[in-house]
Image: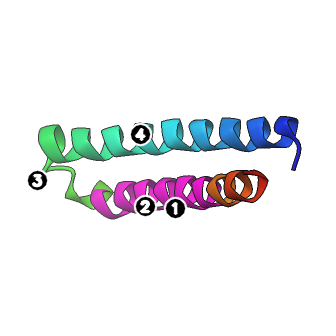
Amino acid sequence: MTDEELKKLEKEVKKAKRLAGEAAMELHDLIEDRLPDAYGELMAVAQNTYEACKVWDEANQKFLAASAATA
C-alpha cells in the first residue's frame, strides 16, 4: 500500500471519528437536556450513534491493518 493510500485511509478514519463524536454529542445532549420529555427520540439517536461508531471502528481497523502490513 502506498503512502498516498495510507493517508487516504487515515483521513477517512479522522472523518469517521469526527462524525461519531458529533453523534455522541447529540446523544449526550438528549440525555442531559431533554429526557424524559424527548424519550421518543432516544432509540433513533442511540442507533445513529452506534452506527457512526461502527463506521469509525471499521475504518480504523482497516487503517491499522494497512499500517501494520506496510511496516
Percent across and percent down for residue 5 are 84, 42
Quarter residue 16 falls in: top right
Quarter residue 26 falls in: top left
- Mark 4 vs mark 2, CA separation in Å: 11 Å
- Mark 3 vs mark 4, CA separation in Å: 23 Å
Task: Please name which of the two marks, 2 or 1, marks the residue nearer to the observer.
Answer: 1
- Mark 2 vs mark 1, CA separation in Å: 6 Å
Residue 12 in the figure: left or right of residue 5: left
Quarter residue 41 falls in: bottom left
- Residue labelled with disc 1: 54
Percent across and percent down for residue 67 are 69, 51
Category of crowding for the residue at label 1, using alpha-carbon neighbours closer than 10 angstroms: few (below 14), some (14–19), many (at least 20): some
**Amino acid tagged 4:** Gly
**Sequence order check, earlier mark of 1 and 4:** 4
- Residue labelled with disc 4: 21
Residue 64 in the figure: left or right of residue 31: right
- Name above or below for residue 44 compared with residue 12: below
Per the rendered image, the range of residues in magenta is 42-61
Task: Please name which of the two marks, 2 or 3, marks the residue nearer to the observer.
Answer: 2
Residue 66 in the figure: left or right of residue 46: right
Circle 2 sits in a helix, a strand or a loop, which is it? helix
- Residue labelled with disc 2: 50
| Residue 59 on the magenta span | yes
Task: Please name which of the two marks, 1 or 3, marks the residue nearer to the observer.
Answer: 1
- Mark 2 vs mark 3, CA separation in Å: 21 Å
**Sequence order check, earlier mark of 2 and 3:** 3
**Sequence order check, earlier mark of 4 and 2:** 4
Asked if the residue at tag 1 contacts the one at tag 2, i.e. Cβ–Cβ closer than 8 Å, the answer is: yes
